[in-house]
Image (spheres, rainbow, N blue to C red):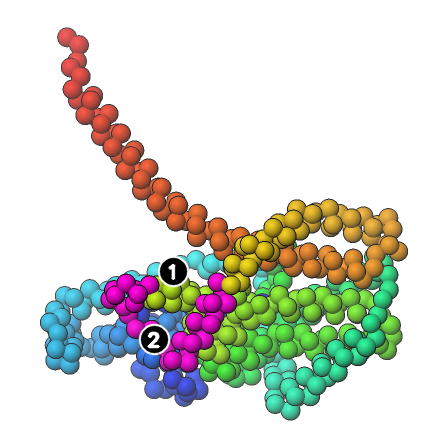
Amino acid sequence: MSMAQQHVVTAPNQEASHVATEVHQLKGFAHQIVMDSSENQESYLLIGTNGRHMRLSPTAYALLQKVHSGLSYDEISAEINHRQHTQITASEVEAAHQRILEQITEIEQRPQKAMFGMWMRFRILPDKIVGAMVRPLTSLFSRPVVMGLLALIAAAICAIIWQRPSFQISPMVFWEAYLLFLLSLMVHELGHASACARYGATPGEIGFGIYWLYPVFYSDVSAAWSLKRWQRVVVDLGGVYLQFGVGVVYIALYLLFQWEAAFVAVLQILYSAVFALNPILKFDGYWVLSDAFGVTNLSQQPKRIIQHGINRFRGRANTALPWSTGTIVFVLLYTVASILFWGYFTWRILPFAIQTIASYPALLFSILRDLVLAPHAISAAHVQSLGMSTFIACITLLMLFRIGYPLLRSILSAVVPMWARLKSAILRQAGHRSSRVAPDS
């Protein structure tokens, strides 16, 4: 699970190392670059001294540069009025500058938010150790090695399909497989970090946590925002790429030594990859699409597209979409896919998923009981059933949150002010009545 956080302050295809020399250094920031996106206007990525990534519009960045260069608010307003034929006052320029600084300060002082559903999160490897560990792994992302490893992955999958193994799973096999799977998850995160380092960005820490029901490792690759889009895509896919490489080793161990735990671990890796590459949820697959098409905050764009269409239909004033025609087509297709996905989930999958969640504790208890009392009764089908049920349960909980949380927030945002006004009116009425009561003489 890669973690790349970016904060928007307000509303280009060059190497980060070259672009950075073309952007004036601003006091109080460690680094600034022009961000590679598909938007029609450039976006500037500022990296604060505490490592926070902030995206600024050209207007906001230009204002910061002018103030930093020593121009007064009067001089800036005069320059803007001359160039754009407007009547901007110096006080308005000062107010805009202060708003930008306030947003930047608020972002830098804001506590780091953990991903929803992530708990028991803690660091395992600090960034310096991660950097040392991934240095020898960067060669795995050279083109010849990638082509060779992909061929091995395809051959290994064909071999395991041809074998069609079937066997009983003992408690020892189950726990051995689980440990092998955890090892592959760690390699997954090293894949993100090593791809990040391959293109000159510095990877951050690697940690461990529980994401819903799944134990997960995470890798901080926020530095990847400074890379080209195609390089960010490699970072996004780097985790699954190296994890599949580990899967090839496991398949070889099974074919050579009939190590059953290795095969079970391969099944878990496949389930994990399907989960990670889902493009609708905010996992690796989501970031692949977002970075490939250069659309930041991709999950928020369906709402933007729908609102844009409604405004055009009603003849309202509309802000032009900031992308090329091809990118707009992609966002439209993604919007349709999101609507179909959520609709299908709501009407067809949701009842089945809720039933799966309801029966999940009994299934888990049954397998744990068999592990202790009747290990010979556990088969690969049992493990696959548990894996699929866990996958469905996690997806369902995520979906319910995505649907329910915005709805609950909207209800609360409407109810709380109404309650406050009602309470205030009651207090005013009570005060008015008490003022009309004469004291006893």
Given the image, on which type of amino acid does mark 1 rest? Gln
Which residue, as the protein is rendered here, is positioned at the far bottom? 144
**Residue 315, picture quadrant:** bottom left
Majority SS type along the magenta span: helix
- Residue at x 83% of width, y 59% of height: 379
Among the 4 quarters of the image, the one containing residue 127: bottom right
Where in the figure is residue 216, as x and y percent of width and height?
63, 62
Determine whether 427 is above or below 157 in the image: above
Q: Is residue 350 above or below residue 60?
A: above
Q: CA distance from mark 2 to mark 1?
A: 30 Å
Mark 2 vs mark 1: in front: 2
Residue bearing mark 1: 109
Residue in view at x 34 percent, y 86 percent: 22
Q: Is residue 300 magenta?
A: no
Quadrant of the image for the N terminus? bottom right
Name the secondary structure under disc 2: loop
**Is 363 situated left or right of 102 in this image?**
right
Q: Name the spot of residue 202 as percent of width and height, x first.
A: 51, 77
Can residue 230 be seen in this snapshot? yes
Q: Which residue is mark 2?
A: 322
Instruction: Judge from the rendering whether residue 352 lies leftward or rightward of residue 416; answer left or right.
Output: right
Please give the range of residues in magenta.
310-339
Q: Is residue 330 magenta?
A: yes
Q: Residues within 10 Å of mark 1 (few under 14, many from 20)?
A: few
